Image (spheres, helix red, strand yellow):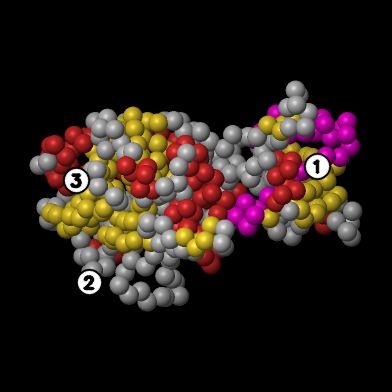
Amino acid sequence: INKLGYVYWAWWRKVNSEEMATNALQNFQEELKKEKKKRLFLVNVDEKKFYRATCVGIDYRPSGETFSPSEKNRIPHYYRPYRFCAWFKFTRIENITEAEYLKVAEFIPPKAKTLYVIVKNNQLKKSWIKLPISTFNKISAKGSTILHLSDIHFGSMHGFLSGEKKGFKYKKRLLDIIKAHFDQNLDLKAKVGIIVVTGDLISKAQGVKGFDCAYDFLHSLVTFFDIEHSHVIIIPGNHDLPFEKEKNPLHDYSYQRNYIKFLNKFYGGKTVDMEFARTYSTTDGWIYNFACFDSAKPRHKDLKNYGYVSEVSFDRIIKQIKDKNRDDNAARMFSRKKINIALLHHHVMPVALSSEPQKKEPVTLTLDAAALTEALLKNGFHFIFHGHQHIPFIGKANRGYFVGNNFVMKSPLYVIGGGSAGVIPEELVQDEMPSNTFGIYAPDEKGLNIKVIQYRAANDPKDYLNISLKIV
């Protein structure tokens, strides 16, 4: 800008899930014709960096067709290899503080979309209307028992009978093993009201076939337990998103395409936000608040296997739940039959007894696990459920922090790893857990009762672990 006077700045639209916003762009263009220049904000959500830009022009295609401006020398180098559906002409970009940004915009946008419009309220000229982040209503559930599945890995890493896996080694379907266990425990079956899936539904991002298998499997479980699709919570894992297969996964969010199509199909509508809060009210009087995070965010190609949630993401969702609870005392909320649970794919503390890092397969602990854990503790969360490591796991996480001049240690969070419900034996940790597992969790007046079931494709399911995690 200093050298040439202006540059072209692209809109990195989420092509697979974000609408073209033609009306907003058209209105902006008409206002530019009258006012000659307008102010925009640029936000790096993950790093909480804020910029104010002066825009003097815009070029876009209402159809969503991508193109590049003819003045290539005025396009920043990182945009030049790509084509986009809209380009803004900037004559100035300046760093601003978060406080300066919030004074005007009032909120940090969620990553569900990449273009937001701030609208002046006609009645109160000095105030601004905030774009709603998301709202969530209580969903009624028939029972308070949770079935926890993780790392099912339909596709090449799936260890059970399916369309691709045949022969003696894969003589049973995973669905049949789960159904057989509950058919022998009909009282337990009747109490299952929620199914939680903590990522890696498919193998190595192998796409549509794997997600079709996942859809059929989860739909069959919904039918078997006599619940609705809305009673299933699904979050993504690293195997669900093709970071390596997509040529430029970070510039248009194309790596999310197949996963979001699967969500849209499963939930019967347009599902944009991969991170959300969800609340269930059970017939036996329990309230579950779930904070659901995408920890498979590719901050950089070299970090694609590491977990990362980001402070902006978890602050936004935790705040929604805290505002709904109007309390941050975990024990007091539990005494009122409220349970707060965070879900993510990657582990937040070591799971395997020993891990040996390798160049291609790093030790993939969630990079901001400490910040996430502290935020959950401060806001009265009771549990974290995760997957990723194919070992069932139970631990406690705690961190002290300052409140004013006082150093506080709250009751610890329980951390529960789901193991792997469906991966092949070669991908299990043979000296720690050579079997597949799923979890069954049920609350009582003292805490959460944890039962872990182990099995293999050739073996019947049996109990691996029974323990009560006390909260009061």
Q: Is residue 220 above or below residue 8?
A: above
Using the rendered image of the protein, determine whether residue 27 is visible from the camera's viewpoint. Answer: no
Residue 31 location (% of width, % of height): 82, 31
Mark number displayed over residue 39? 1
Nearest the viewer among 240 and 448 is 448
Residue 279 location (% of width, % of height): 40, 36
List the residue tagged with mark 3: 178
In the current view of this chain or complex, which residue is farthest to the top?
123
Specify start and end residues of the magenta stretch as a single range.
20-48
Q: Is residue 143 left or right of residue 307?
A: left
Nearest the viewer among 211 and 351 is 351
Residue 44 among magenta residues = yes
- Label 2 near label 3: C-beta < 8 Å? no
Using the rendered image of the protein, determine whether residue 56 is visible from the camera's viewpoint. Answer: yes
Mark closest to the chain's N terminus, 3 or 2: 3
Q: State the CA–CA distance, disc 1 to disc 2.
A: 60 Å
